[in-house]
Amino acid sequence: MAAHALTPLNRPMSSAVVVATLAVVDVEIDTGVAIRGEMIRLGQFLKLAGVVDGGGEVKALLAQEVVTVNTEPETRRGRQLHAGDVVGVGVRRWRVTPGER
């Protein structure tokens, strides 16, 4: 019988269990970005915040980077954002704020 390598739990490698721990970090909001109206789409917001220059860049950003809305990953550039939502790209965060009416 062949010898099997054992994990720290003394189980054979083939049945080892991998456990990952995620840390929740309190991240500061970089700035508020005022919108005109009740809602703005994610792609428009990223342009307004100065993260990207145009629509093509939005599509590429969403494909390459982790963009979050209220800490949840988001890939839809048409996602509706409302006042109070927080958009994140990398370590930066922006809060959607209501503009003057």
Image (spheres, helix red, strand yellow):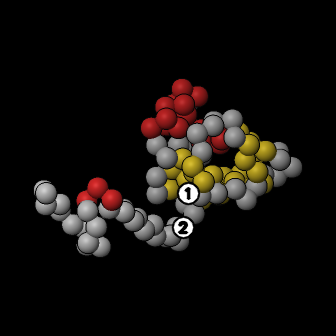
Q: Which residue is mark 1?
A: 93
Q: Going by the image, does 32 lie left or right of 35? A: left
Residue at the location (72% across, 47% down)?
Answer: 81
Contact? badges 2 and 1 (CB < 8 Å): yes
Q: Which callout, 2 or 1, points at the residue further toward the start of the chain?
A: 2
Kind of residue indicated by mark 2:
Glu
Secondary structure beneath disc 1? strand
Residue at the location (65% across, 41% down)?
Answer: 42
Residue 50 is situated, as x and y percent measured from the top left of the image, at 55, 43
Q: CA distance from mark 2 to mark 1?
A: 7 Å
Q: Which residue is mark 2?
A: 28
Residue 24 is situated, as x and y percent measured from the top left of the image, at 50, 70
Secondary structure beneath disc 2? loop
Question: As displayed, is residue 11 above or below residue 83?
Answer: below
Question: As displayed, is residue 33 above or below residue 58?
Answer: below
Residue 91 seen from this side: yes
The one nearer the camera, 24 or 28, is: 24
